[in-house]
């Protein structure tokens, strides 16, 4: 199924440059960009829903516990 997409002139020019540089079609690049965007947005929505469900179950930690855990992460990275 095909679709029509209207984009700004600036975005069109950027897409054209990238298509030339990568030797890919504008359509292919645009399709990949939309796929990547949707994947990230779907993941984000799923993660938010999981967080809400965990909070509803009471599966949370205090701010103090979270800060303590983050400080441990910082020490590991050093």
Image (spheres, rainbow, N blue to C red):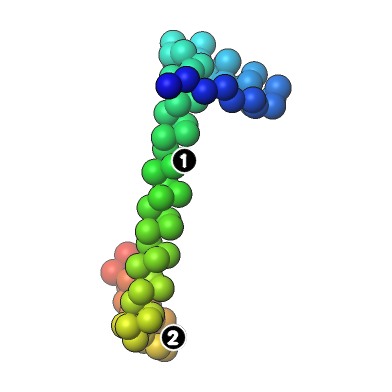
Q: Position of residue 27 (x, y in %)?
A: 48, 18
How would you rate the neighbour count of disc 2 (Cα within 10 Å): few for under 14, some for 14-19, many for 20 or more? few
Measuring from the top left, give residue 2's x and y in whole percent. Answer: 47, 20
* Vertical relation: 46 (above or below) 33: below
Q: Give the left or right position of residue 5, taking residue 2 as reference.
A: right
The residue that mark 1 highlights is 37
Up-down relation of residue 60 to residue 5 (above or below): below
- Quarter of the view holding residue 35: top left
Is residue 78 something one can see in this rendering? no
Tally of marks: 2
What residue is shown at x 43% (from left), y 21% (from top)?
A: 1
Residue at (44% x, 86% y) in the render = 63
Cα separation, mark 2 vs mark 1, equals 32 Å
* Residue 26 in sight from this viewpoint: yes
Question: Judging from the image, what secondary structure is the residue with disc 2 in?
Answer: helix
Residue ranking furthest to the left: 76
Q: Position of residue 69 (x, y in %)?
A: 33, 79
Q: Secondary structure at mark 1?
A: helix
The residue shown at (44%, 42%) is 38
Q: Is residue 35 found left or right of 19 in the rendered image?
A: left
Which residue corresponds to mark 2? 63
Crowding near pointer 1: few (<14 within 10 Å), some, many (20+)? Answer: few
The numbered mark, 2 or 1, whose residue comes first in the sequence reads 1
Residue in the foreground of this view, choosing between 48 and 78: 48
């Amino acid at each position: 199924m095909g679709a029509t997409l209207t984009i700004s002139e600036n975005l069109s020019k950027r897409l054209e440059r990238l298509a030339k540089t990568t030797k890919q079609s504008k359509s292919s690049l645009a399709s990949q960009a939309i796929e990547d965007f949707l994947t990230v947005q779907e993941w984000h929505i799923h993660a938010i829903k999981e967080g809400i469900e965990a909070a509803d179950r009471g599966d949370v930690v205090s701010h103090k516990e979270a800060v303590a855990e983050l400080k441990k992460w910082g020490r590991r990275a050093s």
